[in-house]
Amino acid sequence: MASGVAAVQALPAAQTGSLPIGGATDESKQTQTDKWRGLAYDESDDQQDITRGKGMVDSLFQGPQGAGTQHAVMSTYDYISTAQRTYSLDNMKDGYYIAPAFMDKLVVHIVKNFLSLPSIKVPLILGIWGGKGQGKSFQCELVFSKLGINPIMMSAGELESGNAGEPAKLIRQRYREAADIIKKGNMCALFINDLDAGAGRMGGTTQYTVNNQMVNATLMNIADNPTNVQLPGQYNKDTIPRVPIVVTGNDFSTLYAPLIRDGRMEKFYWAPTREDRIGVCTGIFKADNVHPTDVVKLVDTFPGQSIDFFGALRARVYDDEVRKWIASVGVEQIGSKLVNSKEGPPQFQKPAMAIEKLLEYGYMLVKEQENVKRVQLSDKYLKEAALGEANEDAIKEGMFYGKSAQQISIPVPEGCTDPVAFNFDPTARSDNGSCVYEFKEP
């Protein structure tokens, strides 16, 4: 009892001031041998810290990982909402942009066709359709490349033949060829470009042939029996792997209606958004070091144009470099320099693509498009013996609306391309009365 009293009396007197609530971290226990030493400096506030100890327990009393004070109550995955849709699809391939919606639709379709889903009928065909020049085929090729697939390709030109039944037989051969690749352990798909151009009816003047009927019927039969595709004239009851089919087109309403029903074909209308157009155009002009803000300005200046418009715009900038080369070698020497030349093909330096130059060429391309719609020579030829409004403009004013085909008198900023591709005097005439074009020597 005395010892107990002595022990009580030995306790230090209570000090005045604030009383700390809870234990404080003992820094002396955070040695290099403590495998949990980093927890003392962990400032996170999640529920895992409840049982970690935070360095307050000596390492001697810390159990192995997964048990003891460091055993977590919850895992980090439990904090992720189950309603949140997260995607980890990398939508870039070799510096080219793939639209996320496009990639999602195509990848999901291919994966579903390789899975065995219980009591689920998966459409065999994915039909991607939309406006002209929107990059449907190129986006498909990028996705195939990213998946490591070398698809079996077909085009609309192969869907018609002078021999009845030949295109339908070719489809079956290509399908079985893709199935053999899958059987050997590699993913594959059958890719048909512009299906509506080869198997659709574009109006009352389009002849509907036996081959059109057989192509539609063959695709319907393959979609209904994807693992039993036989060649004409022979029947071997063997099961082949299922091959996903991807087709592109501009208007699927021209196809045979039973072919495009939901059980056989899954439709996807592709209309790139502003972000998609900017992403694709950034890849188009990436090699030319065009600033991203200039790409955005270019896309916003021509909002109604297709993706191919910007590719043609980039190619048009190289015209001045070609003119410089023609002027340097001479028109008479072009053949010997381009065909079977000892020096090889000519090399061109990349021209500096200023935004002003790109906009200028863009407006020229737009004028050419307007000429096609405005000057409809076929109607003129049928109605009267006239040459059209473009010729009328040229006769009256010496020029016609949208004369970008000639590429004449185009102001070019210094340091961008050739300041003057050639000298042109509209009043100068040769002996026979034709205009005189004089190339300027570099």
Image (tube, grey):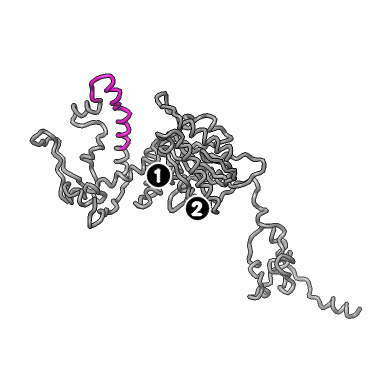
Query: Could you say where residue 441 lies in the image, as x and y percent from the top left?
Result: 15, 49
Mark carried by residue 148: 2
Q: Choose top left, top right, bottom left or bottom right for residue 132.
A: top left
Identify which residue is drawn at 23% across, 25% down: 387
Q: Residues within 10 Å of mark 2 (few under 14, many from 20)?
A: few
Q: Is residue 183 left or right of residue 283?
A: right
Question: What range is drawn magenta here?
Answer: 365-387
**Residue 70 sits above or below residue 31 on the image:** above
Mark carried by residue 296: 1
Q: Secondary structure at mark 1?
A: helix
Disc 1 + disc 2, Cβ < 8 Å: no
**Residue 375 shown in magenta:** yes
The residue type indicated by label 1 comes to: Val
Task: Tell me if residue 273 can be seen.
Answer: no
Query: Could you say where residue 393 lies in the image, as x and y percent from the top left?
Result: 22, 27
Q: Is residue 196 left or right of residue 344?
A: right
Mark carried by residue 21: none
Q: Secondary structure at mark 2?
A: loop
Query: Could you say where residue 29 lies in the image, as x and y percent from the top left?
Result: 68, 74
Identify which residue is drawn at 24% across, 46% down: 320
Taking the view exactly as shown, the residue that stands out farthest to the top is: 383
Which of the two marks, 1 or 2, is nearer to us in this view? 2
The residue type indicated by label 2 comes to: Gly
Query: Could you say where residue 44 lies in the image, as x and y percent from the top left?
Result: 64, 60
Identify which residue is drawn at 25% across, 51% down: 415
Of 400 and 102, the residue lying toward us: 102
Q: Choose top left, top right, bottom left or bottom right for residue 421.
A: top left
